Every structure is written in structure tokens, then in C-alpha cells.
Image (cartoon, rainbow, N blue to C red):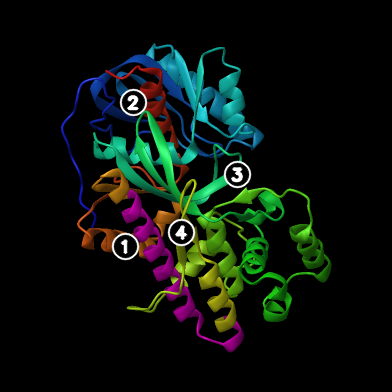
Amino acid sequence: MSKTLNSETTPCDTRLSFTSTDSNHDDDVFILATCTQTPVLAMGGDLKARACLLDGRTATMSRCLENVNDSTQYRAYCKMIDGLIEALGSNAKLVAHDLHPNYLSTRLAQRMGLPTIGVQHHHAHIVSVMAEQRLTKPVIGICCDGAGFGTDDATWGCEVMYCQAGGFKRMGHLDYFPLLGDDAAAIETWRPALALAQQAIGEDWRHMTTSLFSRVSVDELNALSRLAKSTIPLHQTSSLGRVFDGVSYLLGLCDKNTHEAEAAIALERAATCDHVEPYPYETRAGRDGVRMSLSPALRTILSECHDGVPVSLIASRFHETVARMLSATAVIAAEEAGVRTIVLAGGCFANARLRTRVTSRLQQRHYDVAVPLRLPFGDAALALGQAVVGAAMHGGGG
């Protein structure tokens, strides 16, 4: 179990101390230890959409909507935000939103006629845990999920960051790979599998993976293979969620995500072997921090799939590899920053095996590990982090 952390409040910082309402209520109300001077409305994201109003010492979170891209849910989302403000008799002076320019929540924020602050997705995730755990000092955050818009316009999703409420520094991330088919890559798991195979073994991928991609039509496979080799710029990602999808496909566990995290859940369930050795992986210093690569692991996995190694063993070793890679990178960042607390955030850490192994390895190195207690790992926690970051960036914490 990770240690629950408490620390003293200090002046001029937005620190949260929580008292919740009845858990059966649609809204969750959190009482802050300190007072914000500027009411902040945070919009959350488009999936697992949950807004938050931070006013004085009170943070009120709305109920959760699955997907505001659905017209009915979007109307409910708009009413929900109006209700948050009206019910509390308070007018927000600042709106915090995700950095993604095409999110409906972002566009709505920009049409409200109020000053806005864009908050990086993974920064918000990590700060939401800091807020819930009452952490007053900077932390190293490991944030892993399916997608979050990055400051370089790539889709981030496997990040190690130095974080405080008012800002962050990216200290490590997974090597980028192309999102073949963009949004379709989150549904059809063969797409990230193909991108990862091509990245790992280059032109020889067809010879080594013929049977693995036999479930994909030849036309689609050829089209995306040509696209990956073309000079057309492809959207890049560091998403660990897509890596889990791709490995799940390669092991024959899930060809399509028909519901959220279906492929990743199948991969976790297949990992039933204890005390396994990791696959090889790489960490190397780069201009933007530590770069992590799973290509050595993918090369071995592809070979083992061809040789008929049991799926349970491959899945177990893959989990161990990711856990060791993340914890090793976090330790490098923590030592550089002089930080002793490491936060785990993002939907990938709903995976109990991954979370437990990362936590164990960090605690063996005598780091304190913080995880969400009441809030989920996924995007339903974003709005609280956005609100706290917005207040800190605006100078409204007190």
C-alpha cells in the first residue's frame, strides 16, 4: 500500500483539505484549508466530463458525464455548468480548461466571455492527486494514460514530470510513435501494434509478424504501412495506453476496444505469472529529459509470439518491464530535482498490477508514493487539478 501523505499548509499556496458530502449526492464538495481569492470554474475534459467550481475555501465537483461529444450529453454538460454557478450564487472570474483546442469543453470555455487558462492534461492529473493528498511541496509525477494534448502538439501519455500547482517541467517520456489512423488507433488495436512493430524492427516487420496481422485486411495493412513510410507528417504519441492496446493485439487478446480500456484490461487479466524477469528496455538522456524506449521489449515479444511462448508469461513480463522502466525514470528525475515524493496518476494506473509493482519498487528506494484515494485515476479527476492549477497560475491562491 502506498503511504498516505499529509504536510503543513504554507501561506500563499492553494492547498486542499477535504471534507466530503454524502457520497450518494451527485455533487462532491471539498473544503479547502486555504482560501482562493478568484473563483475558478474548471471544465474537465470531453470524456468522463466533470466540472469543478473553486470558490473561496470550497471546491464543488459536478456529476460525471461519459462523453460530451454526444449531443444529449453535451446539453446536459452545459446545464450542469450553469447549475454549478447558479446554485452556489457565485460567478466564476476565471475558466480553466484542457489544452486540447478541439475539445468541446475547451471551445465552450472560450465562448463564456471570461478570462481562460489552458492547463496541460497530465499536469492537471498530477495536481488533482496532490490536492487530494494535501501535498504542499513539489513532487515527481508519473502520469500514464491514453491521450493528453502536449505543449508540443503531440499526444502525450507516458510522462514523468516535476510538478507544483503553478507549473511543471517534463523530465521524461516514452519515445514517440505514430498514431496510425489518429482517433481510430484508440479503437482498432492493430493500428498501434503495427506502429510499434515497425518502430521496433523496421522493414523486417512483415517477415516477423505475418501471422500476427493476419486478422487485418491486406488493403488496410498495406495502406497504413505505406503511410508510415511516407514523408507525410503523422501525428505522434507517447501514449502508454496505446502501447497496452498494441501488445494486447499482438497476444491475440483484443482486436477492438468496444468499451473503455477493454484491451488493457484483457492484458492485465492475462498477466498471471509471479516473480518474472523484465524484458530489455532503454532509458537515455535527451534534450527534453529522459527518453524511454520499449522497442527492445517489443522485439523480444514479437519473437516470443512467433515461438509460441505462453501469453500469460509474455503479459506478465511486459507489465514488469513497464513498471521497472517507469520507476527507474522517476528515480532519475527525483534525484535530479531533490524530491522525495512521487505521485502516480492517469488511467493506466487503474491497472492494479502495474500500480503495485511501480509503488513497490519506489518504496524499496525509500520514496513516498501518493495515489488518488477518493478520486479516480482517470479523467473524472481532471477538473479538480485544473481548478487548483488555474488558481495558482492566476495568483489567486491564498
Where is mark 3, residue-wise?
154
Per the image, the residue denoted by label 1 is 356
Q: Quadrant of the C terminus?
A: top left
User: What residue did someone put label 4 on?
Assistant: 284
Q: Residues within 10 Å of mark 2 (few under 14, many from 20)?
A: many
Q: Which residues are magenta?
A: 305-333
The vertical placement of 253 against 387, above or below, is below
Identify the image quadrant of the N terminus: bottom left
Badge 4 local density, few (<14 within 10 Å), some, or many (20+)? few
- Label 3 sits on a secondary structure element that is loop
Could you tell whether 216 is left or right of 4 in the image? Answer: right
Gap between marks 3 and 2 measured at Cα = 31 Å
Q: Main secondary structure of the magenta part?
A: helix
* The image quarter in which residue 349 lies: bottom left
Q: Callout 1, which amino acid?
A: Thr
Q: Amino acid at mark 3?
A: Ala
Residue found at the very far left of the displayed protein: 8
Question: In the rendered structure, are the residues bearing label 4 and label 3 in contact, judged by CB atoms less than 8 Å apart?
Answer: no
Q: Secondary structure at mark 2?
A: strand
If you read the primary sequence from the N terminus, does the residue marked by circle 4 or circle 3 appear first?
A: 3
> Which numbered dot is residue 59?
2
Residue pictured at 30% horizontal, 42% vertical? 139
- Report the Cα–Cα distance between label 4 and label 3: 20 Å
Q: Which mark sits nearer the N-terminus, 1 or 3?
A: 3
- Residue at x 57%, y 75% (from the top left corner): 299
Q: State if disc 2 and disc 1 touch (CB < 8 Å).
A: no
Horizontal and vertical percent position of residue 182: 68, 50
Q: Earlier in the sequence, mark 4 or mark 2?
A: 2
Separation (CA) of disc 4 from disc 1: 25 Å
Query: Can the viewer see residue 211 in this picture?
Result: no
